[in-house]
Each structure stands twice: as structure tokens, then as C-alpha cells.
Amino acid sequence: MELFDNIPGELSFDKSENLLKRQNDKESFHSIPNTNARYALNLVEFGAPEALKRAEKVIEAVLKCQELDEKNKHFGNFFWEKEDEFVEDLNAVEFVMISFIPMIMRYGDRLSENLKKKILISIKLALYEIKKINVSLIYTNIVAKDIVNSMLGGQLLGDSSFKNRGKEKLKKWHAHIDKSGIPTEYNSPGYSSITINTLSNLIELSDDEESIMIAKLILLRIGISYALHIHPKTKRLAGPHCRAYYPSYRNSPPETDGFYDHIDNGRLDKWFKKLISNQPNNMNIRETSDFEKNTSIGTYHGKSFSLGVTTRELDSQSNRFTSNQSMVFSVKYTQEKDDRPGIAYSKYLLNDKWIGDFRSTPSRGNKDIFFDEGSFRGIQNGKRSINIYAPNKYNSLNLNGWNRCFSAKTCIIWDSSIDEIWINEKKVKNLPLDLSHSDVIVVGSGDIFIGIKPLSITDLGSNAPIKLIEREEQLILELYNYLGPAKTFWELANPGAFYQGQPRSGFYAEVAEKSDFSNGGKFASEILKGKLTEKFDEPETYDVKNKNLWSIEYKRNAESIGIELDMIEFEIKKIWTNDNNQDLFPMLDSPIAIQKSKGDILLNDSILECDGKGSRLLVSIPESNLWIATYNGPSPSSFSLKTSEGNLEIDQLTRGLVKWENGKVEVETTGLKGTPKIKGAQITKIN
């Protein structure tokens, strides 16, 4: 049977348990939420008699993994693995329900009445647990599941309390997103798609028109961010990433596969393709994911590469399942000799740890997460970036007065074939190499050069080195804060009587096309022509009032980029570029799409005007006869869209989505008053 044969290679069906199982270090594990609950959904969707017979057995086995002890704090949740027999990962209930609730709503008539009754009982218990957990608005893919499960589950059960709770949370989540631009969990290779899938269920199955409209606006915003970050040649999602599992660095299928699957299955409209096919040759994208924490993400698409840098890592949670997974600096690029793009990225590592040294649970792979033990602050503009690391104060096993550590370093890692290495203007072949912070290191790989200039680095011992080495067929530039006997660091204990701020560590980075320089030495020479300026305060023991400022600026010709940090708190005081008018914390800024919280949007040949207080967004690609405009509300507003083809006027709406493509206009709104007026095109749909 086709579906049975399509089980992923690392899984097999365990007839004794009626569950898919995975072998991990010679042990068998049966994952419940994101493997077997989804497998049951796939079997029911397939619909053949043999599939339905197996589906009923799998569903029964999954239901046995629900916590049914009424005295248990997490009564109604699920075990992540059958082998657990306890609730630990609180997301389990969300993952099971996002499979089971839509399954019953779409295909309930394919299951036996007895099993359906059991599932409905399970859903009600699960919804009480979801309500009790009440996940924060910052946990993007899980709050989306909370909302969709609550609304659809309440609709399925005929329980308005669950449905209304979900609807109110949807409104709060939308307002939370609109404070910044994109959801808190930004630009994740895996979780962006998961969130799109989740919201699509609400759009298809909900009977609440207002909620459908809000979900469409959120999904559209996530979809635009996703599309803008896909590089047309690498076919990968450009960085930075809030959370990225190690296989997605290079070994997973290209993100274009998932993106086009969303389009083929109707989760995203076909016009989204134009956001990739009509990208300018050189494009900078900037979005804000957490305005209150000064978190914005900057991405540059060149001909052969993308550079992505965030102002800070995702630090909204502190547990071994979700934290320390950010990819804060990355370059992804084409390689003639390899269909897979190359990648360079950074990590802060303690005690010489490496991929494979961390595993969140025994049942999960030890090469799923490359744990980053640093906190990060950065600024990107075009091909250039300044990248700053410090030990992560939220990591209990870090540099402080409690734990002994023998090494602490910033690492820039090339997981790709290396063609050439230059130190300043000299080509080198033999590794390892000892370097100084005055050197410029240029690595040629694939179709690009990456230039790195170390910043001044705090030496927490004596003679902390800068090394260029090879490890497991990867090239690594190591910038050490400490290398020596294992010891504690009283001066980094905070609170503490000796604390004077975080140690300095970081690098300036610049990327160039190989075609722009005859060799890497010429590129190094170009970087050396610039002026790198650092200013830092003399160390002073922290007394609650004082600061310890570190300012870095790189300037060459008319272009500059800079950052200033308070090293006591390791927080950004300011960031800047040569363009003093540039907003470095925009909702969205790019050559083909802009979002703002207020005011008119002028983009290419078009203008969007709204007099309300809600955020507004405009996509303008006149060469493809495409304009997309939204108003997010919830306060009423007029709506005026002017394009080279004509104009659309709406007297009042509370939320709106307009697609203007090839002379045809579709209008979706809530709170519409009056009839939309159009010139130069034909309205083919209103609500």
C-alpha cells in the first residue's frame, strides 16, 4: 500500500504497539505528538480500508498516552514518547490536537462511532489543559496551535467558552505581532511552515468570519517574510533564524520545496511566487520581531549569497527544548561543484563542545541541535555586519562564579568545501594557524569571499589565542576569551563584588562575489582600506548606576556601520549606518514590500493611504502587475490604494486585504461601509 511504503526511512511500524517507532542508540522510541498523531491523520486522510483499519489502532494507542490522572497537574496533556509515561514537553497536547481536531472535522465519518466518542472526550480534556497552560503570545507556533485548537475544538464540541477564548487570544496575538512587525519567533526554517499549516486549518474550518480574516492577515504577513527571505539561487531561507535545527543548516531539502507546497495546496496564494521571482539583484530586508527588546533581523541577498544577522538571539525562553538554537549570523551561498549551497555561521562555545555533545532528551537525536552558549548583539547593512558575543547569562553552565571552564570562544564555522584562504594579502595553505586581532581573514568558498576582522577581545587568562583550524572537515576561526586550566570566573559573577561587565568578543564581517575581485588578497586589501574604530570605557566595578560602554564602527568610502553596547547589561544602546534617516527597527522595509504602524506608504509606483490607527502593508511589483495592500485594524479606517493602473477607494473598513493583479481586484474586509470604488481595473470579489 502506497502510504505504508511512504513512512520515512528512520521510522518503522511497530505492530506490537500499533505505533511508528524510531531507533536511537539501539533503543526504540514511539513519539506520540508530531509522529504518530500526524501519522493517524495521514492514514484517515488517505481513506483506503486498510489505512482506516490501521488508523483506528494508531489512534487508540495515541489516546492511551494521554495523562488521565485527575490529580496530575497536567491532566489532559500527552506524553511526548510512549516510553515517558509522564508529561514533560507541554507542547505535546497542542501537537496531538492540531492533528486530531481537524481530522474529526474533515473526515469524522470515516471513523467508527465508538472511536469518535473517545476522541471527543480526549479533545475536551485537552482543551481544559490548553486553557490552563495558557501559553504566552511570544511562543509563535504554539500560541497559533492554542488559538486554532481552542476555536476549532470549541466549534466541534459546541462549547462557546473554548471558542471565545481562542478568538480573544487570536486578537491579542495579532495586536502583539503588530507592535513589532513579525511574530517573536522570527524566520525559522521549520516553525514558520508549521505556523502557516496551523493557521490554514482555522481559515478553512472556522465558522467565524472575523477570526478567519485575522488569521488570513497573520498568515499573509508570515508568508511575505518567508518569501522575501528565500534566495532565488540557493533556494534556501536566508538567515538569521530564531531557531534552526542542525539538519536545516545544509542537509534538509531546500525551503523552496515547502514554500511551493504551501502554494500548491492553497495555503498561500499563487502571487507569493512573485516575491521570489521579482526580487532585485541586490536586496536588503529588515523586519522587527520584538520592538520592546530591540530585536530586528537584517538580510541581504546578493547574486550568489545571502547574509543574515539579527540584533539579538531569541532569548524569550529558558529550557533545554527551545533555547540556544538561534542562528544569529549566517552566510548561505552557491557552489559550482555542489548542488547544496555552502554555509558559514557563528556560535559561542564553552569547553570545546561541538555538534553531537547536546541532546535535549534521550529519544531525540544528538545532532538535532548545535547548542549556542552565547548571547549575541549585532547590526547588518548590505554586505557588511558587526557581530558581538558574550557568555549567555541564562545558561546555568556558563562563565560565572559557579562553573569551572577551560575554554570559551566565538567560532565562525564554514561547513563547506574551501577553495582558498588569505591572511591579509598572503595566501595560506597549511593549518592550523595562529593569528592576531589585526589580521583580516578571507575565505574563498563556492562563488564568494567572506572577510573577517576580529574585534578587540577580552583575555580572561593569559595569551588567549585566535586560531584557524580544521575540525570534522569544517573550517573554524576561533576567537578565544579563555583557554587554560579549568576555573571559575569571579569577575563574571553577577550579582557579585567583582563584576565589571561582560567580556568583549566579536568580529566585523563582509561578503563579496568572487567575480568582483581577482583573488582573496585583493578583497582583504579592500577591507584593510576601511577604518575600524573601537572605543570602550575603563573597567569599573558595577555599582547599579554605572555603565561600561563599548562602541564599534567600520567606515569605508561613504559607507559606515556601527553599534554601541552597555557591557554591564550586554544591551544595545544604539546602532547606526551612514544613512541617518534609516529606520533600523521597521515593521518591514524592503524594495518590494513595506509595513508601517502609521502614515502613508509610498513604494515604487504606488501609494497606500489609511487614516486609521492600525498597521498597514503594501507589496508593489509593477513589472508583474501586482499590488497587495492590507490594513490590520482593529480601529476603523478609510483605505486608498493608487497604482499605475488606477486606484481603489474604500470609505471605511476595520480590517482589509486587497489583491490587485493583472487588472483584476479582490477585496476582503470586515466592517465594510459603502461600496468600494475602482478606476482602471475590475473588482472580481468583495468579501
Image (spheres, helix red, strand yellow):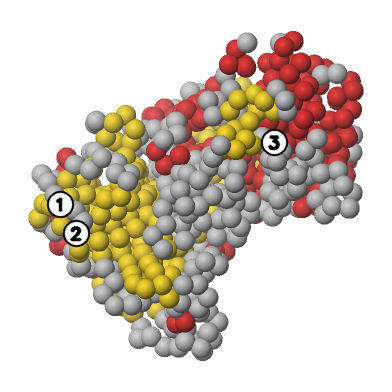
Question: Residue at coordinates 34% horizontally, 32% vertically from top-left?
Answer: 340
**Which residue is labeled 2 in the image?**
433
Q: Position of residue 449 (x, y in %)?
A: 22, 47
Q: Which residue is nearer to you in this view: 500 or 209?
A: 500
Q: Residues within 10 Å of mark 2 (few under 14, many from 20)?
A: some
Image mark count: 3
Label 3 residue SS: helix
**Which residue is labeled 3 in the image?**
32
Sequence order check: which comes first, mark 3 or mark 1?
A: 3
Amino acid at dot 2: Leu
Q: Quadrant of the C terminus?
A: top right
Q: Position of residue 517 (x, y in %)?
A: 14, 45
Q: Is residue 275 visible?
A: no
Label 1 residue SS: loop
Question: Residue at coordinates 82% horizontally, 19% vertically from top-left?
Answer: 111
**Which residue is labeled 1 in the image?**
430
Residue 91 in the figure: left or right of residue 279:
right
Question: Residue at coordinates 46% horizontally, 77% vertically from top-left?
Answer: 488
Amino acid at dot 1: Asn
Question: Residue at coordinates 19% horizontally, 53% vertically from top-left?
Answer: 431
Q: Marks 1/2: CA distance?
A: 7 Å
Residue 120 lies in quadrant: top right
Q: Position of residue 363 (x, y in %)?
A: 60, 42
- Asked whether the beta carbons under mark 1 and mark 2 sit within 8 Å of each other, the answer is yes
Q: Quadrant of the N terminus?
A: top right
